[in-house]
Amino acid sequence: MLEKSNSSLYNIHWPLMTALDFSDRHMAEMKQNKYKLHIKEDYAMSIKEQFDNISEDYDKQRKQLLPCFDDYYHLPLSMLEYEGDKPKILDIGSGTGLFSSILLKKYPKACFTLIDISDKMLSEAKERFAGLDNFEYIVSDYTKHIFDKKFDIIISALSIHHLDAQNKRELFQKCYQWLETGGVFLNADQVLSPSPEIENNFSSIWRSQVENSGLANEEIQKAYERVKLDNPSTLDEQMHWLREAGFSQVDVVYKYLHFCVFYTKR
Ligand SMILES: C[S@@+](CC[C@H](N)C(=O)[O-])C[C@H]1O[C@@H](n2cnc3c(N)ncnc32)[C@H](O)[C@@H]1O
């Protein structure tokens, strides 16, 4: 919002500017960019901190926090078809490696790359896959990381909705570049309803399911804190950005309340 209103303010005044105005504007923009960078860095730190804190208990709470867990994680992966038995798989925002662990059953010989900003979440993944030599782990912000290879399959679950709209859009373009031709990008994520009324309904249904799931109140409150860092975009916006990125096939293969799975093919 802040970014949008400031840039449009500059755009409106731009044609009237003198050379002196230009240097003032330039300085203001530099300060503004520095400010934006701080906000983004603080935001990334909050994400890292929140997930570092929950890392040890993360897996235990999944089914209680995700009422549609089984279908959400299993159905879309069953759609993947890869000729051969060693696909190169990238899991972005892999956390403890939950989504990858399901895909591992389908492709036990695959080469997995797991990337996450939280070293503690990745430590849990390392423990989960201990002894397997077909896994590599990267502690990094995936919006900034440069990969030295391409992938056959990219998966992501419940991570990309933390990014703002522009970063999601740019990430989809990067995913397209990171994929081999014919490769698939499967993103199980949260979407925002374009209708505030429906969004409120989704949210209260989800909260009531979580509150009746048997999860301790303290854990529920922590989950509600993490929800404050969510930044979901609408399904339509994301379909548009995926097509814009160049994906030839773009569809939603599963949806329950605001939990949605996008299936896209390069
Ligand atoms: C809700 S967890 C999901 C973990 C896993 N994909 C799953 O389904 O269980 C979200 C994960 O995304 C990671 N994450 C969020 N933004 C990130 C970013 N910009 N770069 C790398 N990891 C990020 C968090 O650290 C966290 O581990």
Image: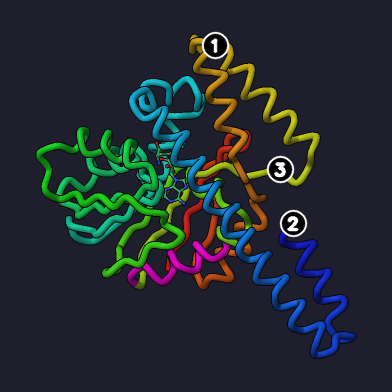
Q: Residues within 10 Å of mark 3 (few under 14, many from 20)?
A: some
Which numbered disc, 3 or 1, marks the residue that appears first in the sequence?
3
Q: Are marks 1 and 2 in contact (CB under 8 Å)?
A: no
Image quarter in which the C terminus is found:
bottom left
In this image, 191 relative to 136: left or right? right
Image quadrant in which you'd find residue 100: top left
User: In the structure shown, which secondary structural element does the residue marked by tag 3 occupy?
Assistant: loop
Is disc 2's CB within 8 Å of ligand 1? no
- As drawn, 176 above or below 103: below
Mark 2: amino acid: Leu
Magenta segment: does it hold 222?
no
Disc 2: which residue: 2
Whether residue 19 is visible, yes or no, is yes
Q: Which-is-in-front pick, marks 3 and 1?
A: 1
Q: Which mark, by number, is residue 193? A: 3
Mark 3: amino acid: Ser
- As drawn, 12 above or below 159: below
Q: How crowded is mark 1: few (under 14 residues within 10 Å), some or many (20 or more)?
A: few
Residue 96 image offset from top left, x and y in percent? 32, 36
Image quarter in which the N terminus is found:
bottom right
Quadrant for ligand 1 reads top left
Which numbered disc, 2 or 3, marks the residue that appears first in the sequence?
2
Disc 1: which residue: 217
Work out whether residue 135 or residue 266 is closer to the camera in this orientation and state it.
135
Mark 1: amino acid: Asn
Q: Do the residues labelled 2 and 3 touch (CB within 8 Å)?
A: no
In this image, 91 relative to 169: left or right? left
Which numbered disc, 1 or 2, marks the residue that appears first in the sequence?
2
Image quadrant in which you'd find residue 145: bottom left
What's the distance in space between the residues labelled 1 and 2, CA to CA? 35 Å
Whether residue 98 is visible, yes or no, is no
Is disc 3's CB within 8 Å of ligand 1? no
